[in-house]
Image (spheres, rainbow, N blue to C red):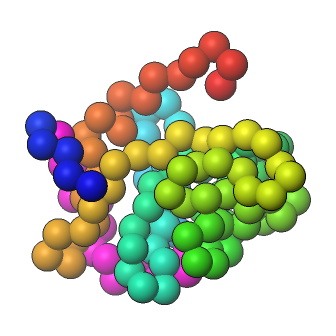
Amino acid sequence: MKHVNEKWLDIAALEDIPRRGGRVLKAPDGCIAVFRTVDDQVFALEDRCPHKQGPLSQGIVHGASVTCPLHNWVISLKTGEAQGADEGAVRTFPVQVRDGRVLISESCLRIERTEDA
């Protein structure tokens, strides 16, 4: 997905994120989990499960989902929504790979919380 007027921040080399794993980016309003799939797609989500706030960055990536290490909730990397019978969602962030570097939208550093977040 292209974001025409986005400013992008270089956060890591693609190789710094293990396939089927994640890394944490500390932002002013909370941590962001950056994931890499087996086929080198990259996704960024809030690093907290909607269930009990488990660290998604420590979960296991399978396909385009991550399983929370605390209670096995499965979260879509594309939408941030809980899968199956579970309900809830986490925020997703624009991320891309360019020339082997992982870039995240500068707007991620200005996370706006809603009242129920």
x and y, in percent, of residue 51 in the image:
81, 44
Q: How many marks?
A: 0
**Magenta stretch bounds:** 6-21
Residue 102 falls in which quadrant of the image? bottom left
Q: On the rendered image, what quadrant is the C terminus found in?
A: top right
Tell me: residue 117, above or below residue 36.
above
- The residue that appears at 36% across and 38% down in the rendered structure is 108
Q: Residue at x 46, y 23 (%)?
A: 112
Q: Nearer the viewer, residue 15 or 63?
A: 63
Q: Quadrant of residue 40?
A: bottom left
Where does the image place residue 10, in percent across and percent down from the top left?
Answer: 21, 58
From the viewer's perspective, is 116 left or right of 112? right
Q: Quadrant of the N terminus?
A: bottom left
As for residue 18 lying within the magenta part, the answer is yes
Q: Residue at x 87, y 59 (%)?
A: 71
> Which percent across, then down, holds residue 107?
29, 35
- Can the viewer see residue 70 in this picture? no
| Placement of 80 over or under 12, stated as above or below | above
Q: Is residue 58 visible to the viewer in this orientation of the structure?
A: yes
